[in-house]
Image (tube, rainbow, N blue to C red):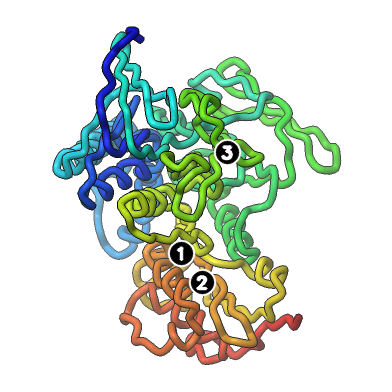
């Protein structure tokens, strides 16, 4: 830094151009404030450039590849079918570039100033931005920290970026692995296992813990994984992962003390997300952090320092873009005089497996632990006529309700259309809807949404496409 360098005066500064950051910047600009966005990498952040979008291109590819058999059964003829990962990688880069340009265009259209570089706080109202040999000083009125998170991995893994891979590197391969070991029970690990199994890999999924779903969904996921010939190893702790010639040597220890060795062509793991705060210089400011190192905020995103706000993966809660986007908009509105509220209790969580999973609210187990008189209903997707004709009969829809008040507590799905359909569940949960609030309106016919309707109707034994059965009720 040059002594005596003049600082530029800024209004709102957003640090980080990921989903949370650019949503915050555009929303604040739309509300009449002058916004400067600082991004050290590419606009769109990890989600667009390395995480969500690249991985979902692969999961979509796998889902469509699996659908070829159904299309052939219907009479669609193909000269040949195969996998060309070189073309897929080219497609991925084209789509990422297009989406990134779209974000940049939106920022420009809203007069959001974009500065490239790494930001570091010098005081509660001043930031330094370093970009190569250039250094700028910015005075600001308000700043929103949206620097996201970084992945951390078990120390026992020796990565080499060719066969021992991190979760983002697996989506850069030019060929489908012959034998792939996947370690983890988070949504990224499960998506990798499902997609690559559909595309032809012999997949071994190593689960250190149980699946983080409602028990019925977890059971169905494991059933479908078995159908996809995925070998699932439960209750296994990773002890060692090293390259072994052209392949990978993995050592596990089961809960009973048994040691197991696995040889595979490739290994991948999804890291644990921790907040990216190291370069920000927050230790100079004395900002309040949680015990796990996240920035502590109020319900609007304001930190212990009045001029600073924080959103996304640097705050507590699930490391999901949907949370960052909501928080980003809320912070922008609060800064500009609004009174927003962020409640992530009913946050929709999705997994683009084949078929996809989506859920929100309490699981059956969580509802019981919370003391509710729990009533549940499950509807198998195979009972849905539209799912049958589209070749997508796998999965189920489960609703959890309070047996005393009929208020819905949770909605859990696996099957075609689950990702789009979960929004109806989220809306019902946010409205504290009773089962009749979902069963009274007419549902489009034929459609995947009728599975949700019949699951809700099943709470009162009114589902036509379910055989009569007893409700499961657990009293307090």
Q: Residue at x 61, y 20 (%)?
A: 158
- Whether the residues at callouts 1 and 3 have beta carbons within 8 Å, the answer is no
Q: Nearer the viewer, residue 105 or 341?
A: 341
Q: Earlier in the sequence, mark 1 or mark 2?
A: 2
Query: How far, Cα to Cα, is label 3 from label 2?
Result: 42 Å
Relative placement, left or right, of 288 versus 239 is left
Query: How far, Cα to Cα, is label 1 from label 2?
Result: 8 Å
Q: Is 67 drawn above or below residue 244 in the view shown? A: below
> To which residue does mark 1 refer?
415
Among the 4 quarters of the image, the one containing residue 224 = bottom right
Q: Residue at x 34, y 52 (%)?
A: 329
> To which residue does mark 2 refer?
397
Q: Nearer the viewer, residue 440 or 251?
A: 440
Decide if residue 197 is in sight here: no
Q: Position of residue 4 (x, y in %)?
A: 31, 10
Among the 4 quarters of the image, the one containing residue 261 = top right
Element assignment for label 3: loop
> To which residue does mark 3 refer?
288
Identity of the residue furthest to the front in this view: 4
Q: Is 424 drawn above or below residue 351 in the view shown? A: below
The quarter of the picture where the C terminus appears is bottom right
């Amino acid at each position: 830094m040059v002594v005596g360098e003049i600082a530029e005066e800024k209004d709102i500064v957003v640090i980080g151009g990921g989903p949370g950051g650019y949503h915050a910047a555009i929303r604040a600009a739309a509300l009449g404030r002058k916004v400067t966005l600082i991004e050290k990498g590419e606009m769109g952040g990890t989600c667009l450039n390395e995480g969500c979008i690249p991985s979902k291109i692969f999961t979509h590819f796998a889902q469509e590849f699996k659908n070829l058999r159904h299309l052939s059964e219907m009479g669609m003829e193909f000269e040949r079918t195969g996998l060309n990962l070189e073309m897929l990688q080219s497609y991925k880069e084209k789509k990422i570039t297009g989406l990134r340009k779209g974000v940049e265009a939106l920022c420009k259209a809203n007069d959001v100033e974009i500065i490239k570089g790494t930001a570091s706080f010098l005081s509660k109202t001043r930031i330094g931005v370093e970009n190569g040999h250039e250094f700028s000083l910015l005075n600001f009125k308000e700043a929103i920290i949206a620097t996201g998170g970084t992945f951390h991995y078990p120390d026992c893994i020796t990565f080499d970026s060719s066969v021992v891979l991190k979760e983002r590197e697996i989506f850069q391969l030019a060929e489908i692995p012959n034998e792939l070991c996947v370690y983890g029970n988070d949504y990224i690990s499960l998506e990798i296992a499902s997609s690559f199994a559909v595309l032809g890999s012999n997949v071994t999924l190593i689960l250190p813990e149980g699946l983080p779903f409602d028990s019925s969904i977890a059971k169905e996921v494991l059933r479908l994984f078995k159908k996809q010939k995925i070998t699932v190893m439960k209750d296994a702790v990773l002890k060692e992962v090293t390259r072994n010639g052209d392949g990978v040597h993995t050592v596990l220890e089961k809960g009973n003390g048994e040691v197991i060795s696995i040889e595979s062509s490739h290994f991948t793991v999804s890291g644990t997300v921790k907040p990216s705060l190291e370069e920000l210089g927050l230790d100079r400011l004395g900002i309040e952090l949680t015990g796990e190192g996240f920035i502590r905020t109020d319900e609007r995103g304001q930190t212990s320092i009045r001029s600073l706000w924080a959103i996304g993966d640097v705050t507590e809660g699930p490391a999901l873009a949907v949370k960052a986007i909501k928080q980003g908009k809320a912070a922008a509105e609060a800064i500009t005089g609004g009174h927003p509220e962020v409640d992530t209790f009913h946050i929709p969580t999705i997994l683009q497996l084949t078929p996809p999973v989506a859920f929100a609210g309490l699981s059956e187990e969580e509802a019981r632990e919370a003391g509710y008189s729990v009533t549940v209903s499950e509807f198998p997707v195979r009972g849905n006529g539209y799912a049958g004709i589209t070749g997508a009969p796998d999965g189920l829809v489960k609703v959890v309700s309070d047996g005393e008040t009929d208020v819905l507590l949770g909605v859990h799905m696996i099957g075609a259309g689950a990702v789009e359909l979960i929004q109806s569940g989220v809306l019902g949960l946010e409205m504290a809807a009773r089962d009749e609030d979902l069963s009274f309106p007419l549902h489009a016919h034929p459609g995947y949404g009728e599975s949700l309707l019949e699951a809700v109707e099943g709470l009162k034994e009114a589902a036509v496409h379910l055989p009569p059965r007893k409700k499961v009720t657990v009293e307090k």
